[in-house]
């Protein structure tokens, strides 16, 4: 088995409800995650402030 090539050091901080801050390598400041639109409606979450979801990031990363 080979040595580990990369280990992501990420810190997640839950701020309120579905809203979180993620501290990612090579990124200035935290990345804000939350809910918006149909996703908020589906989960019955408050979208008083619409924010990008983790699902949005996964889809963007997969497409890249």
Image: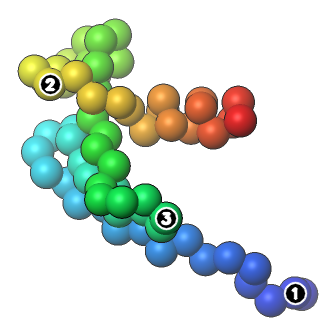
Q: CA distance from mark 2 to mark 1?
A: 45 Å
Q: Quadrant of residue 41?
A: top left
Quadrant where the N terminus is found in the figure: bottom right
Residue at 28% x, 44% y is 32
Left or right placement of residue 36 versus residue 14 in this view:
right
Q: Position of residue 23 (x, y in %)?
A: 35, 62
Residue at 38% x, 32% y is 53
> Can you identify the residue that label 1 sits on?
2
Q: CA distance from mark 2 to mark 3?
A: 26 Å
Is residue 1 shown to the viewer in this render? yes
Asked whether the beta carbons under mark 2 and mark 1 sit within 8 Å of each other, the answer is no
Looking at the image, residue 29 lies above or below residue 31: below
Q: Position of residue 25 (x, y in %)?
A: 48, 67
Q: Quadrant of residue 5?
A: bottom right
Classify mark 3: residues with Cα within 10 Å, few (<14), some (14-19) or many (20+).
Answer: few
Classify mark 2: residues with Cα within 10 Å, few (<14), some (14-19) or many (20+).
Answer: few
Which badge, 2 or 3, is on the more N-terminal residue?
A: 3
Q: Which is closer to the viewer, label 2 or label 3?
A: 3
> Can you identify the residue that label 2 sits on?
49
Q: Which is closer to the viewer, label 1 or label 3?
A: 3
Left or right placement of residue 48 versus residue 51 in this view:
left
For the residue pair 14 and 5, the one nearer the viewer reads as 5
> Can you identify the residue that label 3 sits on?
26
Residue at 87% x, 87% y is 2
Residue at 70% x, 30% y is 63
Which badge, 2 or 1, is on the more N-terminal residue?
A: 1
Looking at the image, residue 39 lies above or below residue 14: above
How is this picture coloured? rainbow
Q: Which is closer to the viewer, label 2 or label 1?
A: 2
Left or right placement of residue 31 versus residue 49 in this view:
right
Determine which of the numbered discs, if any, sits on residue 37 in the image: none
């Amino acid at each position: 088995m080979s040595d580990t090539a990369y280990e992501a050091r990420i810190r997640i901080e839950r701020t309120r409800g579905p809203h979180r801050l993620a501290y990612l390598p090579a990124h200035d400041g935290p990345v804000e995650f939350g809910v918006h639109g149909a996703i908020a409606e589906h989960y019955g979450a408050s979208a008083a402030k619409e924010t990008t979801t983790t699902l949005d990031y996964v889809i963007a990363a997969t497409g890249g």
